[in-house]
Image (spheres, grey):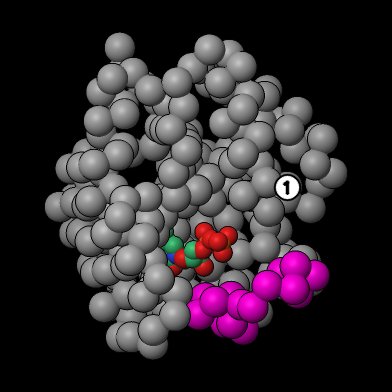
Amino acid sequence: MRGRFITLEGIDGAGKSTHHAWLADYLRALGKEVVCTREPGGTALGEKLRALLLSEPMHRETEVLLMFAARREHIDQVIEPALQRGAWVVSDRFTDASFAYQCGGRGVPTSKLDALEAWVLDGLAPDLTFLFDIAPEVARQRLAGTGVAPDRFEQEKAEFFGRVRAAYLQRVSAFPWRFAVIDAAAPIDSIKNLLEKTIAKFGI
Ligand code: TYD
């Protein structure tokens, strides 16, 4: 039986990495084989592209194309083989991030991404996407508190993240059946509770 594909999304500083690890442990405790991965990245070539994407200045369409190039490898080498052998894939970001950051944030027309999505994903879509929703000001404070040097995206202004957040919420309106919106400002335990309930509700 084919596995399930779960993705985690949200603006930088929403705290999804914490929940990624917890969710994987939770699913393993339910007896699933879980593959934890991330975008951009997830393969040897994808991680090299990630390093470029997070540091090198580039045209916004170059950024789109490299995101989808990394994704092509990721689907071919990691996601599809895992799903085909019945494993559950939990990815820290996927295509919704491109619509949110490159279309919402950078202003690339969505029609261009629709075309790339049809080409590269060939019908693949997450079964369930958790959107960790948070106000950009709160996210910014969290990032500042980590003491880690901000990457090329994290250096963007609050308005950029306002647009990214709005684009994510548009994706929720367009695909309500696969999204669960989580208030990322809530206490960690109540978020865990909600993740558990959502997994149960989706019957997975
Ligand atoms: P992120 O997932 O936030 O990793 P970390 O927690 O290590 O900072 O970083 C990836 C960055 O890449 C993030 O700022 C969003 C950006 N991104 C896009 O702009 N488009 C995409 O399609 C993807 C997958 C990520």
What is the quadrant of residue 143 in the picture?
bottom right
Q: Position of residue 6 (x, y in %)?
A: 46, 35
Q: Residue type at mark 1?
A: Asp
Q: Is residue 145 in the magenta section?
A: yes
Q: Residue at x 66, y 41 (%)?
A: 19
- Extreme-left residue of the structure: 119
Q: Which residues are magenta?
A: 143-157
Answer left or right for 49 relative to 26.
Answer: left
Residue tagged 1: 183
What is the quadrant of residue 44 in the picture?
bottom left
Structural crowding at the residue carrying mark 1, measured as other residues with C-alpha within 10 Å and reported as few (<14), some (14–19) or many (≥20): some
The image shows residue 177, relative to residue 30, as above or below, that is: below
The image shows residue 94, relative to residue 84, as above or below, that is: below
Question: Judging from the image, what secondary structure is the residue with disc 1 in?
Answer: strand
Answer left or right for 7 relative to 22.
Answer: left
Q: Position of residue 76 (x, y in %)?
A: 20, 42
Q: Position of residue 157 (x, y in %)?
A: 62, 84
Q: Is residue 200 visible?
A: no
